[in-house]
Amino acid sequence: MSSNNARTAIVTGASKGLGAGMAKALAETGAAVVVNYREDVEGADRVVAEITAKGGQAVAVQADVSSGDDVRHLFGQAREAYGPVDVLVNNAAVATFAPLSDITEDEFQREMTTNLLGTILTTQALAAQDDIDAASIVNVSTAGAVTLPQYASLYVASKSAVNAFTIVAAKELGPRGIRVNAIMPGPSDTEGTRAMGYAGSDQEAQAIAATPLGRSGTPGDYGPLVAFLASDDARWITGDVILASGGLR
């Protein structure tokens, strides 16, 4: 795999789970990584410590991606630490799994502003830089956009919008050398899914039974894919939405 040496990467929602795995994978290729978090400063600091202990470069920056002011602060801190940002991983997301009748206006706003508006704002911030010749954006969606699980209508709607945004943004930004792709992770074993009670549940057992590779995903399954998409080895890939689910579809 090509090196990401001398690149500056922002990974949103990187204090734990899939985002932490992606941040570590990018650092292993030589990228300087900005570990973004909204609330979990201790988790973000742990990720930074793990990266720097292995000789990598990383810094934690607090920002809520649904706020334009916060996003500008995030990119400003990244630039101050490491220079222009040429890798962006939009991983920050919120999700509530509930019947359609339980969806509220507040929950709609919470999920759409973080999952979709946050992706738009960070993409705008990267594209607003006038001193980059090329860049790679990787948006983290969900395999649910294909499997369409029950009680996930709002989350799947927000991520399906991210998939469409990815394809359109790739067309608009391609002439500037900015590639935009998305990955769709399947059900995974993370701190977040454990806190939701997913690990060991009947729902997990059913998902594993329907997954050809016979297990849940892990953060380590997605980091290498993101690092590849960020690298020059993926220079001819843009506007793609890649299912990474162990075959679950």
Image: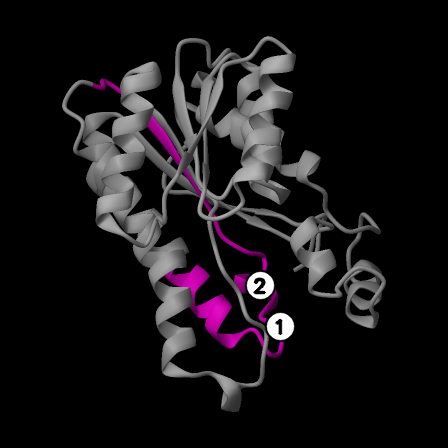
Q: Residue at x 58, y 80 (%)?
A: 98
**Depth check: 223 or 64 in front?**
64
Q: Which mark is residue 149?
A: 1
Q: Residues within 10 Å of mark 1 (few under 14, many from 20)?
A: few
- Image coordinates of residue 55 in percent, x first then y, are 59, 8
Q: Say above or below: 76 vs 95.
A: above
- Image coordinates of residue 241 in percent, x first then y, are 47, 47
Q: Residue at x 26, y 47 (%)?
A: 121
Specify whether residue 221 is painted magenta.
no
Q: Residue at x 53, y 26 (%)?
A: 227
Mark 2 and 1 residues: CB-CB less than 8 Å, in contact?
yes
Q: Say above or below: 130 vs 160.
A: above
Residue range highlighted in magenta: 132-161
> Which element is circle 2 on?
helix
Q: Is residue 171 visible?
A: no
Specify whether residue 151 is painted magenta.
yes
The residue that mark 2 highlights is 144
- Image coordinates of residue 16 in percent, x first then y, are 61, 42
Quarter occupied by residue 111: bottom left
Viewport quadrant of the C terminus? bottom right
* Amino acid at circle 1: Pro
**Depth check: 193 or 213 in front?**
193
Quarter occupied by residue 164: bottom left
Q: Which color scheme did the rendering employ for the protein?
A: one colour
Marks 2 and 1, Cα distance to the nearest angstrom? 6 Å
Q: Residues within 10 Å of mark 2 (few under 14, many from 20)?
A: many
Q: Seen from this angle, which residue lies furthest front?
A: 42
> Which element is circle 1 on?
loop
Task: Give the left or right position of residue 92, taking residue 136 as reference.
Answer: right
* Amino acid at circle 2: Gly
Task: Give the left or right position of residue 17, taking residue 170 as reference.
Answer: right
